[in-house]
Amino acid sequence: MIQSVRGTKDILPEDIHLWNFVEGVLKEKSKRYGYSELRTPVFEKTEVFVRSIGEETDIVNKEMYSFPDRSNESITLRPEGTAPLVRAVIQNSLIQQSNLLRLWYYGPFFRYERPQKGRQRQFHQYGAECIGSDYPESDAEIISLACDILKGVGIKNFNVLINSLGNNLSREKYRKELIAYLSKHLLELSEDSQRRFEKNPLRVLDSKDEKDIMITKSAPSILDYLDKESIEHFEGVKNILSKIKIDFIIHPKLVRGLDYYNHTVFEFQSSELGAQDSIGGGGRYNQLFAEFGAKQTPAVGFAFGIERLIIILDKLIEKDKLIQKPDVFIVSSLTPDDDYYLALLKKLRNMDLIVITDLNRRSFKAQMKESNRIEAKYAILLGEDEKKTNSISLKRLEDGFQQILSVDSIGSFNFVNK
RNA sequence: GCGGGCUUAGCUCAGUCGGUAGAGCAUCAGAUUGUGGCUCUGAGGGCCAUGGGUUCAAGUCCCAUAGCUCGCCCCA
């Protein structure tokens, strides 16, 4: 049997209702905040990601689906959404047409990782980016949008963690202090953290290793190294969040994996997810446009992992409620090409009803069973008797109530509200 | 990339000490040939993940591979 590629999943009809529901909320909330959709290609030149995400990150080093195309150009299936979106904004000169851009994206992304709960090789992300403001109110708007989406789909138990990495100056100053502190304990750190120390010392802070946690407990905190500008920005964000009643937890060890963040970083966590407990996250990235060689442009954004949302919702939502059951099943003993039957079928479908018929020429009884199995609201019983008298027998399946309707009165019958 | 567990019918799972497979649910068909749900009866459905090995004999024991899963790493 040919199987799907490792780490990819089919979304089956039984699951699609949940996806459609989530996608509906994403679009609706984006609209409420005045965000427009921007769709980029699923693949890009490899350098789009190498430049932006950071050469030393795992995503770039070992997780990208990169390959030379037929003209030997290195192509990469997008592992995340911010870099392509920024590329598109620059290429299409969108930021010059307006001093502020509100954009969202949604679609499949690709990372070559070992699959586990909440982690696949093809997965889906929704993200929103607010481009062109350096003020804390834009950070707050983004976080507010994210929270509204989570509440909109019905998730209430989640934590909002926030931190500030400060501007470049603050961050660099802190980095030096942290390295100084960690190098005193280097040999006590876990192997993983010793490796992190070399590549990206800030990441030692969110190690799960118990000894690492002990050591980083008394490490210097980034919040003590923020300069005046950075503090003002962070305080501004916290102030607005408090006023709009978004509960947040200040988490000085939250650093996040992508190199392009500065100032505010944040993450949404749920305990429903096991080891991959982050539903989504984001932050400010004032340097990214400059990395691409464009004019420096302040921006802030976030992304959700849709599969992770779905995992939570799967337990939370009665999926039955999302499924639209058929209105009518036609149980017929007439031939499949009978004029009376075909005319009725057409008439009902033109009434915007969901109408199902048997296509396997099965017995009257089997058709009745089928109408029950698919939970249709009504069965319409059709045979020579009805045909002769220009009528239908209409049976309400919930309670078995049956009546005869003339063909002319079908149009005014209310099928939807039983 | 590293470790643990798992893989038998469409689904959930039994399968003893090695002797070429079973249940429940689901599906389909019957129970006075135009009336569903409940009940009863019956039927179909299996390369026992794949490939090797041990053995007279392997779903069962051994090895490898793949996939799933739970962690590590990383991240959404």
Image (tube, coloured by chain):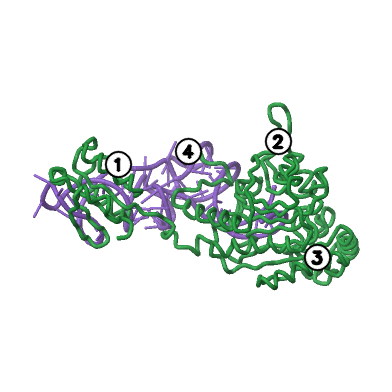
Quick check: A116 left or right of A51?
A: left
Could you tell me the amino acid type at mark 3? His
Q: The residue marked by circle 4 belongs to what chain? A: A
Up/down of A159 relative to B35, above or below: below
- Identify which residue, A220 or A355, lies in the foreground: A355
Chain B painted colour = purple
Query: Dot 3: what SS?
Result: helix
State the image coordinates of residue A206 (x, y, percent, origin top left).
75, 63
Quick check: A108 left or right of B38?
A: right
For the residues marked 1 and 2, what is the alpha-carbon distance in whole angstroms? 50 Å
Query: Dot 1: what SS?
Result: helix
Q: Do the numbered discs 3 and 4 sit on residues whose CB atoms are within 8 Å?
A: no
Q: Do the numbered discs 1 and 2 sit on residues whose CB atoms are within 8 Å?
A: no
Per the image, the residue denoted by label 2 is: A75
Q: The residue marked by circle 1 belongs to what chain? A: A
- Identify which residue, A400 or A131, lies in the foreground: A131
Could you tell me the amino acid type at mark 1? Lys
Residue A122, can we see it? Answer: no
Chain A painted colour = green
| Nearer the camera: disc 1 or disc 2 | 1
For the residues marked 3 and 1, what is the alpha-carbon distance in whole angstroms? 63 Å
Per the image, the residue denoted by label 4 is: A1
